[in-house]
Image (cartoon, rainbow, N blue to C red):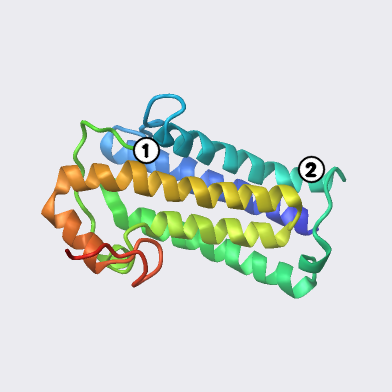
Amino acid sequence: MTAITALALYLIFGALGFGWRSWRQYQTTGSTGFRGISGRPGSLEWFAGVGFVVAILVGLAAPVLQLAGAVSPVRFLSAAPVQAAGGLLALAGIAATLYAQNQMGESWRIGVDAGETTRLVRTGVFGLVRNPIFAAMLLFAAGVTLLVPNVLALLAFALLLTTIELQVRVVEEPYLSRVHGADYRDYRVTTGRFVPGLGRASGA
């Protein structure tokens, strides 16, 4: 049952966080918001984009293969309270993702277009952390992993965490620093990366 719940939540997250949000972006701006994968093949930027997609697909495969009996949950993570907490975390992650996407408004993008300049959003939840959408996605992924804590799900979460860190550090932060200059550098000093107060840049 938990595998079915995890699969359903994954599909809901994809439909709302990617499908519906992209459709809404297109209705508002004429663009879906998808900017593709940055960097040349084999570069850190490229790995961040490709790895992110792979992490999503592996995470989706985890409940499917558990339902098929191909993988089994790790025993010490299979307690009912742990899985219940996972369901709540996943739901909170979906809600937080949609909320942060909405606050980003027309500046919402997936990927980076080096020739494009969007408004730097620093208000609302973006005043607490610089990357609330990614933080919410990690919350969702952690919840799904607790629902189906098999080896594949744990691997998917580790890969997602790694590639999000890479995407933020080697793709988005250099781009935003170049485009927004002192405003973004000040934002990095005053605001945490994923958690309030953590990951702030040095003011020097």
Find residue 64 and report its image quarter. Answer: top right
Q: Residue at x 42, y 36 (%)?
A: 44
Name the outermost residue toward the bottom.
81
Residue 184, horizontal then vertical, whole percent? 19, 55
Question: What kind of element bears circle 2?
Answer: helix
Q: Quadrant of the C terminus?
A: bottom left
Of the residues under marks 1 and 2, which one precedes in the sequence?
Answer: 2
Residue 50, horizontal then vertical, whole percent? 50, 33
Q: Residue at x 37, y 31 (%)?
A: 38
Mark 1 to mark 2: distance in Å? 29 Å
The amino acid sitting under disc 1 is Gly
Q: Which residue is mark 1?
A: 111
Q: How many marks?
A: 2
Tell which of 120 and 187 is nearer to you.
Answer: 187
Q: Residue at x 84, y 52 (%)?
A: 72
Name the outermost residue toward the top.
41
Residue 80, horizontal then vertical, whole percent? 78, 72
Name the outermost residue toward the right.
69
The amino acid sitting under disc 2 is Leu
Residue 105, horizontal then vertical, whole percent? 28, 51
Residue 73's place in the image compared with 106, above or below, is: below
Q: Residue at x 35, y 64 (%)?
A: 199
Q: Which residue is mark 2?
A: 65
Residue 135's place in the image compared with 61, above or below, is: below
Q: Are marks 1 and 2 in contact (CB under 8 Å)?
A: no
Residue 113's place in the image compared with 83, above or below, is: above
Residue 128's place in the image compared with 130, above or below, is: below
